[in-house]
Image (cartoon, rainbow, N blue to C red):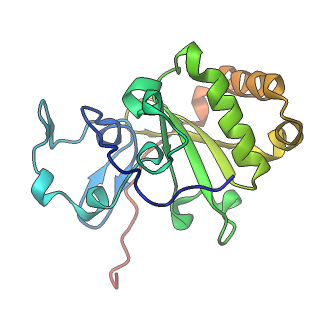
């Protein structure tokens, strides 16, 4: 399954501010732990929008770039923030040069009516060789647990066995032990840039 790299025309964030809370921001300009609301987020959106940091200016969630995801998949509606993790930020065991990845960061349990679409989408990504990471957030300030779905779901994806994909994802979510969450630590920045 190919992933679109361009923004979907006419698709805007609207009231969604999931990317201002859920993910980690760890750049030279700004640091925000995962699950912690950005200090610049106010009732009207980003208080420094016109002068926002380059990490924020260049970030677009998957919903903004993946035409296959309908309006119901906007992160604040679906409870799932699709994005990509830069290769250098991937957990070491998942780094494979040039391989596309998609992270499904769960903000909340998605509504039942879109779960079937989620399983079909995951099946297509896995069958297409895209690294799919399910990210289960911990308490605010704790790094999410990342679970690669590919190896476990490869056969089910090839067969289009959505029931097995659903069962695996639900078991994984139920079994995510809280002791695996680790506090966020700001990365040391390379002084040479």
Q: From the viewer's perspective, tell me whether residue 132 is left or right of residue 49.
A: right
The residue at 36%/71% (across/down) is 189
The residue at 50%/45% (across/down) is 67
Q: Is residue 160 above or below residue 50?
A: above
Q: Is residue 68 or residue 78 the one in the foreground?
A: 68
Residue at the far front: name it: 9
Q: From the viewer's perspective, tell me whether residue 104 is left or right of residue 173.
A: left
**Residue 45: which quarter of the image?**
top left
Question: In the rendering, at what x and y percent does residue 31 appear?
Answer: 28, 54
Question: In the rendering, at what x and y percent does residue 23 appear?
Answer: 40, 44
Residue at the far top: name it: 112
Q: Is residue 78 or residue 136 the one in the foreground?
A: 78
Residue at the far bottom: name it: 192
Question: In the rendering, at what x and y percent does residue 193 appear?
Answer: 34, 81
**Residue 112: which quarter of the image?**
top right
Q: Is residue 71 above or below residue 58?
A: above
Question: In the rendering, at what x and y percent does residue 187 appear?
Answer: 40, 62
Q: From the viewer's perspective, tell me whether residue 180 is left or right of residue 35.
A: right
Q: How many numbered circles does the render carry? A: 0
**Residue 13: which quarter of the image?**
top left
The residue at 26%/64% (across/down) is 54
Q: Is residue 168 or residue 26 the one in the foreground?
A: 168
Q: From the viewer's perspective, tell me whether residue 111 is left or right of residue 132.
A: left
The residue at 10%/51% (across/down) is 48
């Amino acid at each position: 399954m190919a992933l679109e790299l361009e923004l979907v025309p006419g698709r805007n964030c609207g009231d969604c501010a999931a990317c201002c809370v859920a993910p980690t921001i760890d750049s030279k300009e700004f640091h925000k732990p995962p699950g912690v609301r950005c200090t610049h987020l106010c009732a009207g959106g980003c208080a420094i929008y016109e002068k926002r940091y380059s990490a924020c200016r260049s970030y677009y969630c998957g919903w903004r770039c993946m035409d296959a995801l309908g309006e119901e998949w906007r992160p604040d509606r679906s409870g799932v923030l699709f994005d990509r993790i830069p290769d250098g930020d991937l957990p070491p065991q998942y780094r494979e040069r040039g391989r596309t990845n998609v992270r499904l960061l769960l903000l909340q349990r998605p509504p039942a009516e879109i779960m079937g679409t989620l399983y079909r989408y995951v099946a297509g990504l896995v069958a297409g060789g895209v690294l799919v990471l399910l990210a289960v957030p911990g308490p605010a300030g704790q790094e999410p647990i990342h679970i690669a779905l590919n190896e476990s779901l490869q056969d089910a994806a090839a067969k289009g066995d959505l029931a097995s994909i659903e069962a695996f994802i639900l078991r994984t979510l139920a079994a995510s032990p809280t002791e695996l969450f680790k506090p966020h630590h700001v990365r040391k920045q390379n002084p040479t840039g």
